[in-house]
Image (spheres, rainbow, N blue to C red):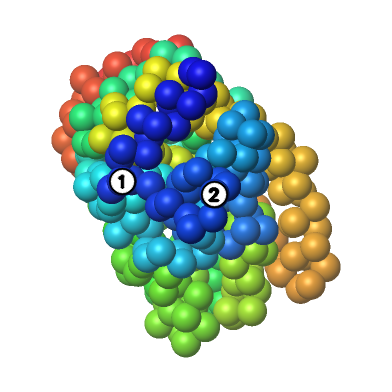
Amino acid sequence: MACKKIFSLLLAALFLWTVPASAAPEMTLKMALGDPEDSEMGVVGNAFKKYVEEKTNGKVEVQCFYGGALGDESECFRNVQKGTLPLALGGIANLVPFEKKLGLLTLPYLFANIDEVVAGTNGAPAEMLNKYATKAGFRVLTWTYTDFRYISNSKRPITKMADMQGLKFRVPQSAVLIAAYKAFGGSPTPISWAETFTALQQGVVDGQCYGYIGFKAMKFNEANQKYLTEVHYTYQLQPLVISERAFKKMTPEMQQLMVEAGKHAQDAVLKFQVETAEAAKKELVAGGLVVSQLEDEDQWKKAAIEKVWPEMADFVGGKDVINEYLKACGKDAWK
């Protein structure tokens, strides 16, 4: 009886749900995802879908639309905010325009390793981030772990900051990342994710930044990307968000299901990322990708903390917001 009540209430919210012609499933929930299915996003999408459909005995169907099939990530986040699309998964930089405080996650050298990333997206830090997101009309269900944004390019190996000179890099429309690339000596060019492959292939830009699994899924090795450097300046987090309008209209039971499905998907993608990234790297190297390490990463970090953080502090909500988050993560305050 309780299950039937949940579904009846959800069916009333017609602006959120697509009702199929057949008797089963009783409702369909659409999810927009920016990357192909054979990426970390695919792990999240499939894990979330399976959890929801199994827990509701198939009465709720989750449809996943990969590779920007429903529009670019910014457009999909905007539709979630408006309540015309229930779920969307995309890069954090594309969510920042809706709530600048989330931009603190893009500050260079905020996280030193995956353990710090996980700590910063669970517990008290996650609650703080969701407080910011809900004010903008979103609720984060899953933080997708996709590795550090390693820098690739078509021209030459990058082993020191001086090697960045004269190279054009695709970056998302992120003031923080643009400032970071300038501090590192590169020339950043904002290009939408949907247009990135073509821009690389046609030589509009020389390089981009992504982890091994995403690099492989996007086939960037087929878009002139011959060299990759393991720079640890920022970790690419991709939030799966649900429309706050949709969430508030749900029964407590369905809200809990969404939260549980999101947590299940987050656990699944962390396991996948840790287990799969090295294999993706080996496959890319075997295919000809040249991987380099930095000789002077301390200089990159110094440039980030001394130039980018002061310049971008107000953009991400101010020094107090940054330090509040650092405290929640158990880190020392930024002075």
Which of the pair 203/26 is nearer the observer? Answer: 26
Label number found at residue 61: none
Image coordinates of residue 189 in percent, x first then y, are 33, 69
Q: Which residue lies under the disc numbered 1?
A: 14
Q: Residue at x 30, y 40 (%)?
A: 13
Image coordinates of residue 94 in percent, x first then y, are 33, 52
Residue 68 higher or lower than 105, as above or below: below
Give the crowd class for mark 2: few <14, some 14-19, many >=20 residues within 10 Å: few
Q: Name the residue type under label 2.
A: Ala
> How many marks are shown on the rendered structure?
2
Which of the pair 8/202 is nearer the observer? Answer: 8
Label located before the other in sequence (1 or 2): 1
Q: Name the residue type under label 1.
A: Leu
Image coordinates of residue 54 in percent, x first then y, are 66, 34
What is the spatial separation of the Cα atoms under label 1 and label 2, in whole angstroms? 16 Å
- Picture quarter with the C terminus: top left
Q: Residue at x 59, y 80 (%)?
A: 224
Q: Residue at x 67, y 58 (%)?
A: 38
Q: Residue at x 24, y 23 (%)?
A: 321
Image coordinates of residue 269 in percent, x first then y, are 64, 39
Give the crowd class for mark 1: few <14, some 14-19, many >=20 residues within 10 Å: few
Label number found at residue 23: 2
Report whether residue 224 is seen.
yes
Report whether residue 120 is seen.
no
Q: Give the SS element for disc 2.
A: loop
Residue 257 higher or lower than 37, as above or below: above
Mark in the foreground, 1 or 2: 2
Residue 301 higher or lower than 320, as above or below: below
Q: Give the SS element for disc 1.
A: loop
Q: In the image, is 124 to the left or to the right of 263? A: left
